[in-house]
Image (spheres, rainbow, N blue to C red):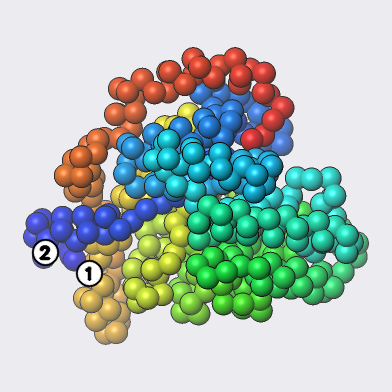
Amino acid sequence: MGQDKNVGSRQDVVWKALDRFHIEIPSWGFANTGTRFGKFVQSAAATSIEEKFADAGEVNRLTGASPTVGLHVLWDLPNGVADVEKIRGLEKQHGVKSGSINPNLFQSQEYKYGSIASPSAEVRRIALDHLLESVEIGRALETKDISLWVSDGSNYPGTQSISRRIGWMEEVLGAMHAATTEGQRLLIEYKPFEPAFYHTDIADWGMALHLASKIGPRAKVLVDTGHHYHGTNIEQIVAWLLHLDALGGFHFNDRKYADDDLTIGSIDPYQVFRIFHEILSAPATATAGIAYMIDQSHNLKGKMEAMVQSVVTAQELYARAVLIDRETLSALQDECRLVEAEELFRDSFWTDVRPIVRAWREARGLAGDPLQQLRESGYVERIAKERAEKNRNSVSSYA
Ligand code: PSV
Ligand code: MN
């Protein structure tokens, strides 16, 4: 869809795409967060799972594009399966469903030297039990994905056996995969460093892909856009994972330096556009199951505003990628007409799709400008008042 197509057909193609485009928001994005240097408490931050669901419901009401909320087991279901009933009630109350279930294998003291890659068989067993409970929670809540990131690694050369740890991970993840049932998936997330600074056990997409392929067909790779070294061509990784039918989903966020968890597209919107282009270039059968998720926790920005901004930005960048006339582009690529190909690509990126996205919202009975609507609704002021005292007293809790 280049300059030659009329406005009407552009609108049509974008509207159809937006009807299908959903992006999950994380429960932890509504809670107070910080850096290892400190945490700046926000009066409006959610202090409980009830408040997280209320906020997520509000973002979905405003955007119409975030019908699920990602849950972190330790922070959101501290009693495990016993909390499922409560979550079901919150889903009904706030009109959003539970999305990915995120086990937590990085906070308990026993995981000091690793979880699924720990040299201690006892610790690996504790980790597996938590993973099995996460699978059960996912089943009980009827969600599709269990999304796993492990912080396992080491800080000094020679202090751990990198190779033996691979075998231990294969064993634990294999047992977890065996416990999943039809309709469930296990997404394996990679990250090159932090908190480990010498080696990380699942450091890149090759390692995640190996583990996913080894343990079984329900395991796929999760790409967190913040989890790459500078200069990494993420869209190329995406193209490979699509080719291998191994792309499970995304954690979207942006970064300038490391895993900064900044708002999607705030530093490099062109990168998100290029990722969407690879996805839209692949056969629909390979992309139908991709889970789009946001993984951001904002230290300084207001959480509600940041989340609305993120969903809206994701929609806009997706819409721009939808506009690329891929047939013409493909012909130009084959003929190596480089400048014309690049200009066609750039033309879509530079198209201001906001009027089309706004019209889509209005046609669906949503607010034309969700951020403005949030401001006018008084929601943030109300929750800030209600939660101020709880937040003052909660400086020490992460979730
Ligand atoms: C790790 O940095 C990560 O990206 C994982 O997805 C965690 O679940 C999440 O952040 C926690 O904030
Ligand atoms: Mn992540």
SS of the residue under disc 2 = loop
**In the rendered view, does 306 fall on the left or right side of 151?**
left
Q: Is the C-beta of the residue carrying label 2 under 8 Å from the nearest atom of ligand 2? A: no
Q: x, y percentage for residue 266?
A: 44, 44
Question: Dot 1 surroundings within 10 Å: few (below 14), some, or many (20 or more)?
Answer: some
Name the residue located 42 percent from the left edge and 18 percent from the top edge.
381
Q: x, y percentage for residue 384?
A: 49, 19
Which numbered marker is on residue 325? Answer: 1
Q: Amino acid at mark 1?
A: Asp
Instruction: Give 244 or 4, whichever is nearer the viewer.
Output: 244
| Circles 1, 2 touching at the beta carbon (< 8 Å) | yes
- Picture quadrant where residue 277 is located: bottom left
Q: CA distance from mark 1 to mark 2?
A: 9 Å
- Is residue 365 visible to the viewer in this orientation of the structure? yes
In the image, residue 260 above or below residue 348: above
Q: Amino acid at mark 2?
A: Lys
- Is residue 251 visible to the viewer in this orientation of the structure? no
Question: Dot 2 surroundings within 10 Å: few (below 14), some, or many (20 or more)?
Answer: few
In the image, residue 60 above or below residue 189: above
- Picture quadrant where residue 160 is located: bottom right
The disc, 1 or 2, on the residue closer to the chain's N-terminal end is 2
Instruction: Give 136 or 34, whichever is nearer the viewer.
Output: 136
Q: Is the C-beta of the residue carrying label 1 under 8 Å from the nearest atom of ligand 2? A: no
**In the rendered view, does 234 fall on the left or right side of 257?**
left
Name the residue located 58 percent from the left edge and 64 percent from the top edge.
187
Name the residue located 46 percent from the left edge and 32 percent from the top edge.
54
Q: x, y percentage for residue 253?
A: 50, 49
Give the residue pinned by disc 2.
5
Q: x, y percentage for residue 330?
A: 27, 79
SS of the residue under disc 1 = loop
